[in-house]
Image: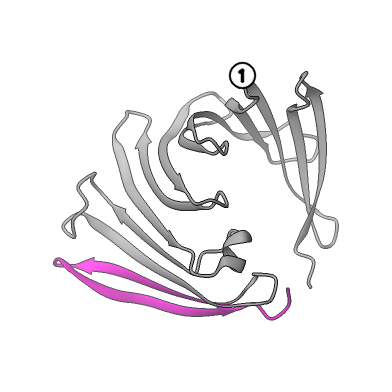
Amino acid sequence: GILIDKQAMEYEDYNIRGASGKTTVLTYDEGDNFVSARTVANKTFDLRGRVLTQEITNYTDEAMTAISDIQMIDNSDYTRYDYARHMSIRTYTQAGELVDRQEIDNTYDIYGNAQSQVINRYDEFDRLIDHKTVMNTYDSALASRKGNATHTTIRRYSSLTESVDYLIERQEISNTSFDEKGNILEQTLDRYTVDDGVELLAASEVIRNLLI
């Protein structure tokens, strides 16, 4: 395959359960040029060691002195397989100003893949920016173990009311071919927009992954 990027990761602040309290990730491209840096701090855990609150800090420089944004994440309503059914993500500027808030509800299959997601995004004044639904279908057992859906439908609305009157766009993503390891070989993406209450195909593309 072709090297896309590589990451250097450092784990520290382990608790008595062996879970890392802080992870530092540096990402470089194939030419060893710096791409991004971030730290993930796991702040609190439940009695089973599952992360309840996290703080992710993204940096624009390798020395990690220039912050681009900070995300505060709350995980709750875990399944018995330790997947969070609900996530609340608040993004702040380096000055601490709220950019937006996302409230995410998930359902999972037995492999931990997200079967459905509902994502509501709000601005700094708590006004709805958009409402998104994601539905994933896993018709291939091999691909599902890799976390690859055979089909995904994404709808984005301007309101919590899910009707064509408020629909901004719809995406239909079909993963039509997989290799023996479950990697996606071919994918089609159709994007629809709405004009006077009618969904119209705005763009269509086919993506082929030749070297994996």
Type of residue at label 1?
A: Leu
Q: Quadrant of residue 94?
A: top right
Colour scheme employed for the rendering of this structure: one colour
Q: Residue at point 51% right, 64% down?
A: 149
Quarter of the image where the N terminus is located: bottom right
Q: Which residue is mark 1?
A: 47
Q: Position of residue 163 (x, y in %)?
A: 18, 56
**Camera-side residue of 37 and 17:** 17
Main secondary structure along the magenta-highlighted residues? strand
Q: Is residue 181 magenta?
A: no
Residue lying furthest right: 32
Name the spot of residue 108 as percent of width and height, x first. Answer: 48, 48
Q: Is residue 201 magenta?
A: yes
In this image, 65 relative to 86: left or right?
A: right
Direction from residue 152 to residue 46 in the image, left or right: right
| Residue 203 relative to residue 196: left or right | right
Residue at (35, 50) in percent of width and height: 132
Between residue 143 and residue 134, name the one nearer to us.
Answer: 143
Q: Position of residue 36 (x, y in %)?
A: 72, 46
Task: Name the one closer to the observer, 196 or 142.
Answer: 142
Disc 1 packing (10 Å; few <14; some 14–19; many ≥20): few
- Under tag 1, what secondary structure? loop
Vertical comparison of 149 with 132: above or below: below
In the rendered view of the protein, which quadrant contains the C terminus? Answer: bottom right
Q: Which residues are magenta?
A: 186-212
Instruction: Kindly indicate the quadrant of the structure image that contains residue 196.
Output: bottom left
Examine the image and state in which quarter residue 183 appears: bottom right
Q: Residue at 64% of width from left, 21% of height from top?
A: 43
